[in-house]
Image: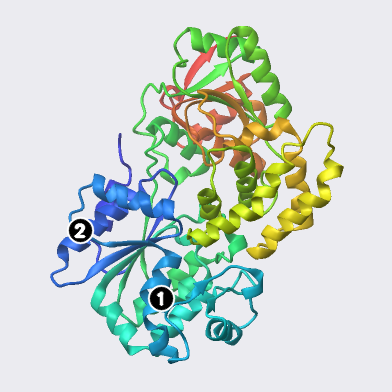
Amino acid sequence: MDIIDEQVREDILIANGSIVVSASAGSGKTTIMIKKISKVLNEILDHRTVAAITFTVKATEEIKKKARDLEVIKDFVAMTNDSFVEHEIIRPFLVDAFGEEYQREFLVSYDVSKRFDSFDEGMEVLRVRNTLGTYRNNNHNFKFELAKKILENSQAAREYFRAKYSTIFLDEYQDSDMNMHELFMYMKNVLGIELFIVGDGKQAIYLWRGAQRNIFELLEAEGIQSFELITNFRSDFEIVNYANLMHNNSQFDNNRAENVSHVIHCLTNNDLNSIDSLFRSGELDINRSVTIIANRNDHAQSIAENLKFYGYNFVFIPRTPIDESSDHSSILKSIACYILDNRYSVYDVADVLRIEQNRSILKRIESLLSPLEQIIPLPPNTSKDEITSSFFRIISRFNEHFGLDITDDEIKLLLETLSNEMFYPAFIKSNDLHKVMTVFGSKGLEFNQVISFSGYYNFSQEGERNNHYVCVTRAENKFVMLEDGRYSNSINVIARNSGITDMKNLYKIIDHT
C-alpha cells in the first residue's frame, strides 16, 4: 500500500521536543507511538524512562502488546491516566505536599456521598474520611487538580519526576479535560518533561465527562509542533482516495489510481437482482464480510428479509432510539450491551465510564446494574409501563453514583430500546459475515465489503455528505454504490473539477440496467 504521509511519519520519529500528532481513524497511531517510544528509550543514556498513558485498561494492554510485537526491548511505564496520577503522584507525595494529617493509604470512591463542590471540601473528605472522592460537576477533575497541586507544593515530587521521566506519551488526548491538560502542561513547562500527544478531534465522544472541546486549540497556543497522519491502513487506497475526492479534497491524488476496481458504481433498476449478480459474478466475495448500509430501519430490514428469497442470510442490525441521542449515548449503549450480551462485562462498562477497574468499583457496577436483568427482557405478560418505575429507579441510582447527569428523557429512550426485542441485535456482538444496518449503526466499525444506495446521499446537504463519508470509509477492500446514473453524474462533475478526465481512474462502472 502507498503511504501518502510517509515523510510525515519519518519526521515524527526524528522530531525533537514535545509534539502533537493528529491521527485519523485507521492511521496507525499506536504503531507510530510505539516506534517513537522505542527510539526515545534507545536515546536515553541515563536511568530515566518514559510513560505511555491512556484512558482505559484495554488501551493500555494494547500498547503493551504492540510494544512486544515491535520488539521494544527496554521497559517503560504503561498505565491509565487515573492510575498514573494516583500511584506516581498522589499516594507517594500527598503527605509531603499537605502534611502528616493526610494518609498515604486511602480509598478511591465515585459514590455520590463522597462528592463535593470545591477543592477544599475534597481535601476535607480526603483528610477526615480517608477517601479520594470526585467533584459533583463532571467538568472538573479533582484527582488531576490535586496531582498538580502536589507537584507545585512538593519539591520531592518534582525531583522524582525530573529524575524518572524524559518523555510522557499521551493517547486519546481529545478526551482530556481541563485539569488533565493543565497537569500535563505543568510537566512540560515547569518540569521540562517532553510530551508526545496523540488524538483525533473527530473522535471526541467523552464531552459528558468534561472533555475540553477546544483541546487542540489549547495545544496550538502552547506552540507545540504538530503533525497529521491521514493514511488509512484499513481501506484500500482506491477507497480512501474516492472518499477524499468529496470530503478531503486537499488529500485527493488524481495521479495514483488507474483502472480502479475497488470502487464500483452499479447502475441498476433492481437493487436485489444487482446484489445477487455481484455475488454470482464474483465481483463481491460471499465468503468475506459484506455489510449493506441503508439510512432507515425499514429499508434495511426489508433488504435483509428479501435477500433470503435469493438464498442469502443477511442479519438486520437496527438503528435504535438511543443512537445519536445525546452525549450519553455511549453509556446508554454500554448498559444495553451489559444486559443483553453475556460476553459484555463490567470491565467493558468501566472502560466506557473511564474509571479505574479495581475490585470494589467493578462489584459496585455489577450491583447497580444486575437488577436490570430481572426485568429486561420483559417477563411474559409484562408491559413497559409495569416496569417503568423500577427501571427509572435502577438507572437513576447508577446515574447518581457515577455523577453522569443522564436525563429522564434519555432514560425513557433507553427503556424504549430495551423493551423492544427488535433492537436487541444492535447490542449483541455478532460473528455473522453478512449484515444490513443503518449508517448510524456502522460508525466506528469496518467491513471487508460495503454496499450502499445513492438515493440517500445529496451532496448539497451537510448531514448527508457526512453520512456518505462514514459509509464509504467503512469498506476495507470494496465499496459498491447502487444507483440509477444521477449519482455518477454528480461525482463526475466533482471529479472533472479536480482534474480527472478518465473516470476509470476513480471508479468502475457495472451496468445492470
Callout 2: few (<14), some (14-19), or many (20+) C-alpha neighbours within 10 Å? Answer: some
Residue 85 falls in image quadrant: bottom left
Q: Amino acid at mark 2?
A: Lys
Q: Nearer the viewer, residue 356 or 202?
A: 356
Q: Nearer the viewer, residue 479 or 94?
A: 94
Mark 1 or mark 2, earlier in chain: 2
Q: Which residue is mark 2?
A: 39
Residue at figure coordinates x 36%, y 29% from the top left: 257
Residue 277 appears at what percent x and percent y? Answer: 54, 8
- Quarter of the figure that contains the N terminus: top left
Residue 500 appears at what percent x and percent y? Answer: 44, 31
Q: Nearer the viewer, residue 119 or 252?
A: 119
Q: Nearer the viewer, residue 415 or 29?
A: 415
Q: Which residue is mark 1?
A: 185
Residue 74 appears at what percent x and percent y? Answer: 19, 59
Residue 237 appears at what percent x and percent y? Answer: 38, 33
Residue 506 falls in image quadrant: top left
Callout 1: few (<14), some (14-19), or many (20+) C-alpha neighbours within 10 Å? Answer: some
Q: Amino acid at mark 1?
A: Met
- Which SS class for mark 2? helix
Q: Is residue 301 above or below residue 4?
A: above
Q: Is residue 480 visible?
A: no
Residue at figure coordinates x 50%, y 27% from the top left: 431
Q: Which mark is residue 34?
A: none
- Left or right for 480, reference 51: right
Residue at figure coordinates x 59%, y 63% from the top left: 209
Instruction: Name the colouring of the figure.
Output: rainbow
Q: Is residue 167 above or below residue 421?
A: below
- Quarter of the figure that contains the C terminus: top right
- Left or right for 325, reference 102: right
